[in-house]
Amino acid sequence: MDESDDVHVATFGNRIDELFDVAETATATVDAQGRITQWSKQARQLLAYPPAEVLGRAAADLLAEDIPDTVRLSSAALEVWSGQAVVRHRDGRHLRVELLAQPSPADDGKITWIISAVLAGRQKRQMRKNHEQQDKKDGDWPLLDWAFDQSPLYLAVYDVDLRIRRLNAAACRQLGIDQGEERGLQLTELLPGGPALDAVVEQLRKVAQTGEPVRYRVFAPTLINLYGEALAISISPLKDPDGLIRGVYSAAFDISEQHRAQQRLALLNEASSRIGSTLNVIRTARELVEVVVPGLADWASVDLLESVRQGYEPVAGPFSGTVTLCRAAHQSIIEGRPEVVVELGQADVYPDYSPPARVLVTGRPALYQISDPVMARWVAADAVRTAKAREYGFHSMLFVPLRARGATLGVATLARHRHPEAFEHDDLILADELAARAAVAIDNARRYTHERATALTLQRSLLPRRLPAQTAVDVASRYLPASSEVGVGGDWYDVIPLSGTRVALVVGDVAGHGLHAAATMGRLRTAVRTLADVDFFPEELLTRLDDVVIRLAAEESPASTGMSGDTGDGLVSTCLYAVYDPVSCRCSLARAGHALPAIVTPDGTVDFLDLPAGPPLGVGGLPFEAADFDLPAGSLLVFYTDGLVEGHDRDIDAGQSALRRVLADSAGSLESICDTILAAMLPDRPSNDVALLVARTRALDPGQVASWDLPAEPAVVADARAQASRQLASWGLDEATFITELIVSELLTNAIRHARAPLQLRLILDDSLICEVSDASSTAPHLRRARVLDEGGRGLLLVAQLTRRWGTRHTRHGKTIWAEQPLPTG
């Protein structure tokens, strides 16, 4: 029965005045069948039963002992009666009370009993005595009572069975109940169940059992009855003077603001560690939306200017008119992202009045509700956007410009549709901070993408676009740049035709990454081609190349450039240089700190050539040595940079063992062998550049080479011309006889006059006709312009005019002068 239905005992007559204190009297009405029909507020305070649990229930159920027979007789006689009875409290305790029952006839003749009850005199006197003793003891009991009720904390007192004995006013307001209604109830009867409530009850039970206080935090909207709220709860045992646990006391404090601040700080910390983990524009945009969903928004998207997405310079602004943006990333709290209006990679046009265009113009973030006129106009202009907004219930949106280093990159959009609360100003500040961090990371990725593309373009332009035609070897090559996080390096390869149908095979690796490494690689490749044209031995070429690297490092050092930073000091590179002669089937190799090349013989045997270990280029002071190997035709030479065999998960020995296994099973064309090697040896995202050069040796047919050992006598010149003529006739090259005789005569005459024996004449038939004269002298002839009255000096000038090219190369025991002329047409 509610307060308006309370029965005032003053109407019961003088008998009531004698026995009862009206302020403390609990009243109820019972019908003729003994069922309770009304229940006062004081009755609930006395026995802790709410009206819903007693109305319609038999009054005898509340008795702990049977009433005397005299009471039953008075009841049957419809007489007023009074006396003591023992009743049952809701928590199970037995209370002795003074009862007064008075019949009250109704208009329809039915009898209703009005029952009044107060605590029996002894219990009442004991309670009052306890209060008086307490008042005498501390003299400020009312102050403590007021402090409990007026505290802003949510205070609660429970008995050992965890039934609520008292809640303060703040806790009752939070729960939406009147004070006194909670007494005798369990916490689970006041709040909706769930894991959070179960955890709190378990903590209360733990304290009641162990007597050890605990501190606990709750982040459960259903527990606190407010969305997004958080509580800090302190739970302590209540003990009597003998140390026995008589109850549990809890104090809860609203820490919602602190919790929200911690969430924002945690989101910023998460953004610092997650956004910008890679130097990839799209990946960085994806990291931003993955951080804010679901931490701040239910939906997020990042739209970038097309120039930014491709790595070019952003527009400095200001913007005007319509803006075209490209979707770089989006994320939703709903699996599958069904809210999507613009697909990834798709461009969308935003009119000048739309929120994304506005924030690009102003450069400031903006908060909109879906009902705002600007938002409503923009959404209504697109049927798909209108349908999605209506279907998923978008209600609050943030638009944040992505700006870095004074340039605008794009717009980030955050929206809520599942989250019932709209964005606040603090959310706008947080989103702006997150977008600022992401914008710097996106701009860094854009700059790196641009630099990487430039370096890659430079490097590919400096590498051979197509390998030159030559007879000595069949070749195939690959260059694979490192993953975008590492950058373009300085790996390179080259195939250089040499005189006498020989060929030089080169692989190198400049330390470092980026434009500087690519540019240095180009300079070294040019230097190698220049030195190879002089026909140096491999070890001598590396010695001279080492001088070039040291000189480049000195030119780029801070002392020589006047720069404070270190741009080139300590330049280091590795290199492997090999020369193969298809006439002798002999290969001479030298290396400067480079990995050993692999060889696969025609019978399938795989091995690594044992070359002397030279220092890397740029170290200086140490010699280089070459090694010579006889290679049967059909042998497979595999040159590579260390990125093929070394990595974070293996050393070079393990890598070479893996390469050995791959080569043992490789077959087919050189192109397929290259693909097989890369597929088997490298991950999807290699951590270093890789240059690979595979060559299969060939041998010239003996019928394509003719040689004669000659004495160093002038008379032998005519005989040599005749032998050369007969050889040309056997090759069907009669049209080349005149020029060849002239070249043989001139080269032999110079050798006889200026060099020393032994002499050798050799003709090689390839895609050109090569004439070589070898002698034991190391002095090389040089071309000079003869004056009018000079009797000599015109021979080499004449040879240069009649041939495609000519030159001198040094051998281990002298030199060889050679001249190459094109074959006659047809």
Image (cartoon, rainbow, N blue to C red):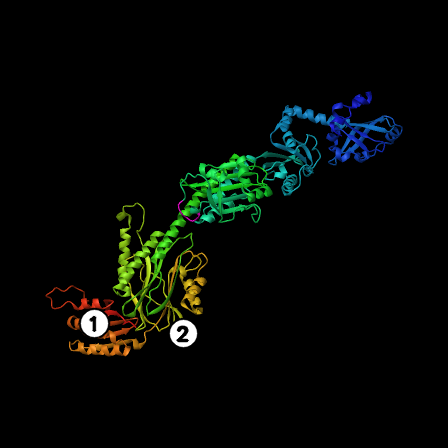
Residue 301 rendering spot, x and y as whole percentages: 51, 44
Furthest residue toward top: 14
Q: Is there any visible trace of residue 490 in the rendered image?
A: no
Q: Is residue 238 left or right of residue 673?
A: right
Location of residue 257 (image quadrant): top right
Does dot 1 land on a helix, a strand or a loop? helix
Numbered tag placed on residue 603 in the rendering: 2
Numbered tag placed on residue 471 in the rendering: none
Between the residue at mark 1 and the residue at mark 2, the CA separation in whole angstroms equals 43 Å
Tell me the mark number nearer the camera, choosing from 1 and 2.
Answer: 1
| Pointer 1 local density, CA inside 10 Å: few below 14, some 14–19, many at least 20 | many
Tag 2: amino acid: Asp
Of label 1 and label 2, which has the lower sequence position? Answer: 2
Residue 266 rendering spot, x and y as whole percentages: 51, 41
Q: Is residue 655 left or right of residue 242?
A: left
Residue 18 rendering spot, x and y as whole percentages: 80, 21
Q: Nearer the viewer, residue 415 or 571?
A: 415
Q: Is residue 271 left or right of residue 95?
A: left
Does dot 2 land on a helix, a strand or a loop? loop
Q: Is residue 59 left or right of residue 367?
A: right
Tag 1: amino acid: Ile
Give the residue at mark 1: 743
Q: Which quadrant of the rendered structure holds the N terminus?
A: top right
The dominant secondary structure in magenta is loop
Magenta span covers which residues? 309-313
| Pointer 2 local density, CA inside 10 Å: few below 14, some 14–19, many at least 20 | few
The residue drawn where x is 45% and y is 37% is 361
